[in-house]
Amino acid sequence: MNKLLKIVVTLVIFVILGYTMATYTVRYDETAVRTRFGKVLAGDASVVTEAGLYLRWPAPVEDVRKYPKTLQHVRHEPREIQTADGFAITVRSYVTYRVTDPLAFFKSVEDQTLKSFEDRKLRPAMDELKSVIARRDFAQLVNPDPEKVELDALEADCFEQLKERIAAGGYGVEIVSFGIERLLFPQEITNDVTQRMVAVREALAANIRSEGETRAQNIRTRAEQIAARIQEFAKRRADAIVAEGEQAANERLKVFDENPELAAFLLEVETLKAVLTRGTTTFILGPEQWGALRHLTPDGAASDGER
């Protein structure tokens, strides 16, 4: 029984080893290059682009090298660069790429690995971008006025140069993007830049304050003009009303002059109407204070007492 078990276990181990050595898998995000005795197969037989399980001859007869289809991100180490106007800056950049032709990549890159390509091909090409950056002035890279900053144009120039350089090498690699991740400056330049930015901001603030004061003065002047017009209109209207009142008074005075006693009587009657229409009215007056109320007495003359 023990001997049979050993045989079964040995057979299982051999089957697993044979399966491992004679098959390989390709994931959905991978491509593979097959080689036989270190050489690629004829035609497209060497390249496997579809995901699945495949058979192969055991190593060292046949070997399989896999490459990702996904984007690869490479961050370049900071490099000190001198701008066209003599300022020293440190630039940290990055690049993304993908392997589009795994067979060309396998044939052109030493060791056929992504690391080998990045270290021996991509990073040296990125170092050459220093000349592109060095053609810019410092104010084109750092400026308080966003319209004068040319970082986007600089990144586009670097991207085009790097893309052409890698394409010319025939590595089967496509450069997808290039960007400047960070700009660093020495302390003395940082202080100088800070002072410049403070000066620019102070000048902008002074211009804004001056503009605000000018606008405020214009508003005050306009308000004073409008107020003067309103006052002038009101004065003319008041003068017109006074003139109308004087004219009406003069006309009434002419009537009063014709019959003064009748005029006085009418005024007293109007006074009584105005007083008596307010409801219950009690008068406590002396004889000399009756005035228009004497017309309410039976004899039409003032008398002592309360009415």
Image (cartoon, helix red, strand yellow):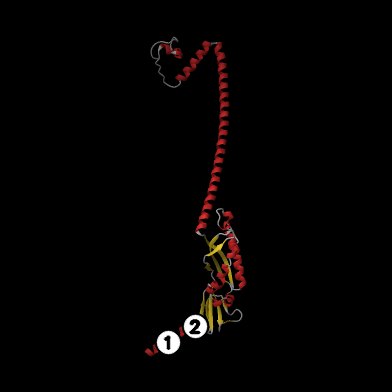
Q: Residue at x 54, y 41 (%)?
A: 213
* Callout 2: SS: helix
Q: Label 2 belongs to which residue? A: 21
Rendered image quadrant of residue 238: top right
Q: Position of residue 239 (x, y in %)?
A: 57, 24
Asked if one can make out residue 1 in the rendered structure from this viewpoint, the answer is: no
Q: Position of residue 36 (x, y in %)?
A: 56, 83
Q: Residue at x 57, y 31 (%)?
A: 228
Q: Nearer the viewer, mark 2 or mark 1?
A: 2
- Amino acid under label 1? Thr
Relative to 248, residue 77 above or below:
below
Q: Position of residue 241 (x, y in %)?
A: 56, 23
Q: Position of residue 152 (x, y in %)?
A: 58, 60
- Judge by depth and name the residue closer to the eye, 128 or 75: 128
Which of the numbered marks, if any, corresponds to residue 171?
A: none
Relative to 269, residue 218 above or below:
below
Q: Label 1 belongs to which residue? A: 10
- Amino acid under label 2? Met
Asked if one can make out residue 253 in the rendered structure from this viewpoint, the answer is: yes
Q: Residue at x 42, y 87 (%)?
A: 10
- Judge by depth and name the residue closer to the eye, 274 or 107: 107
* Callout 1: SS: helix
The residue at the far left in this view is 2
281 sits left or right of 65 in the view: left
Q: Which comes before the other along the chain, label 2 or label 1?
A: 1
Dividing the image into 4 quarters, which one contains the N terminus? bottom left
Crowding around mark 1 (Cα neighbors within 10 Å: few <14, some 14 to 19, many 20+) is few
Q: Residue at x 51, y 77 (%)?
A: 25
The residues tagged by marks 2 and 1 sit, at their Cα atoms, a distance apart of 16 Å
